[in-house]
Image (cartoon, helix red, strand yellow):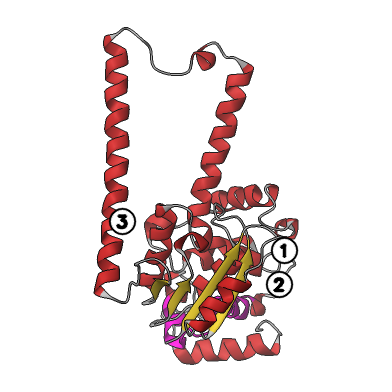
């Protein structure tokens, strides 16, 4: 059980040193520094921290705004930590999810966020109803007239909305794509991405490719991830998949890898549907001989 610090600055002109010193004084065993906008949820350093953090560990920041700029993002990160049995603490804010008081504060924040969303929905409905009683038609007049400027604004707004939705799921797929492509074929990357996800959050290959292309266009992923995957010998495919699962979580147990492979509907080298730790161990040894394990 470790304290893991995260320090973020927005520009190269700023230094994370004061944050790192405060985190070090708080007893953090390791500190990760990142230069990125607070509004960007797809931060590679933060993604790696959330991937590797273990049960009982605590993610520590100096202030909440160093981790998230919106309440929804903060709650999303804390939910991911709780799913791993980890905790969150801010040194200057009253949030420590390992304590009853911190959990209560978090519940209050979540309730406030839901109340705010409900108020916005009710105001929107009331405004539309009032406009209809006065004979006004809802919507953008420019769109009804097919004005090019109005159409362009809507197109850009939709793109921004799409990127915002992608940013909310980036932790699920960006680290895998960055690490596995183009060495691994898309269908295998898709299985690894979907392995730990509940059915309602799983990706199709077309959706994943569209998301990756969008991130490449915006500079969040290198163009190399779109390169053609090299041909892999049939006997090397399973070792590569097992190595990818271990690479995403170095502390994962052999039994957990078995469960992941069964969830991916991968068959054993003998064609069976049920996996045993001995089979996984054999594939990991082969992956190491092939240089697939870092």
Identify the residue position indicated by label 3 in the image: 109
Vertical comparison of 140 with 94: above or below: above
Q: Image height check: is 49 above or below 149?
A: below
The mark lying in front, picked from 1 and 3, is 3
Q: Is residue 122 above or below residue 248?
A: above
Secondary structure beneath dot 1 equals loop
Q: Residues within 10 Å of mark 3 (few under 14, many from 20)?
A: some
Question: Which numbered dot is residue 217?
Answer: none
Give 113 or 216, whichever is nearer the viewer: 113
Check disc 2: other Cα within 10 Å, few if <14, some if 14-19, many if 20+.
Answer: few
Q: Residue at x 44, y 83 (%)?
A: 275
Q: SS of the residue at dot 2? A: loop
The numbered disc on residue 229 is 1
Residue bounds of the magenta highlight? 237-259
Residue on which the image places disc 2 = 232
Disc 1 to disc 2: CB gap under 8 Å: yes
């Amino acid at each position: 059980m470790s304290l893991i610090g995260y320090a973020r600055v927005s520009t190269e002109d700023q230094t994370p040193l004061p944050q790192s010193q405060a985190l070090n004084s708080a007893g953090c065993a390791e500190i990760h520094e990142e230069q990125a906008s607070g509004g960007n949820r797809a931060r590679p350093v933060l993604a790696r921290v959330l991937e590797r953090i273990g049960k009982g560990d605590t993610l520590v920041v100096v202030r909440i705004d160093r981790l998230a700029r919106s309440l929804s993002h903060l709650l999303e990160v804390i939910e991911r930590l709780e799913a791993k049995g980890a905790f969150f603490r801010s040194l200057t804010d009253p949030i420590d999810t390992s304590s009853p008081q911190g959990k209560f504060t978090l519940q209050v924040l979540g309730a406030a966020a839901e109340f705010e969303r409900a108020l916005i929905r009710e105001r929107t409905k009331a405004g539309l109803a009032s406009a209809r009683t006065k004979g006004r038609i809802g919507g953008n007049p420019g769109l009804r007239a097919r004005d090019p400027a109005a159409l362009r604004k809507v197109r850009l707004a939709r793109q921004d909305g799409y990127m915002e939705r992608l940013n909310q799921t980036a932790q699920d797929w960006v680290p895998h794509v960055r690490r596995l492509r183009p060495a691994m074929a898309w269908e295998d990357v898709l299985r690894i991405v979907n392995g730990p996800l509940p059915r309602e959050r799983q990706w199709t290959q077309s959706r994943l490719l569209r998301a990756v292309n969008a991130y490449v266009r915006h500079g969040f992923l290198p163009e190399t991830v779109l390169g053609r995957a090299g041909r892999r010998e049939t006997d090397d495919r399973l070792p590569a998949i097992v190595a990818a699962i271990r690479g995403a979580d170095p502390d994962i147990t052999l039994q957990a890898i078995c469960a992941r492979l069964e969830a991916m509907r991968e068959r054993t080298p003998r064609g069976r549907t049920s996996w045993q730790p001995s089979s996984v161990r054999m594939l990991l040894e082969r992956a190491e001989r092939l240089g697939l394990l870092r």
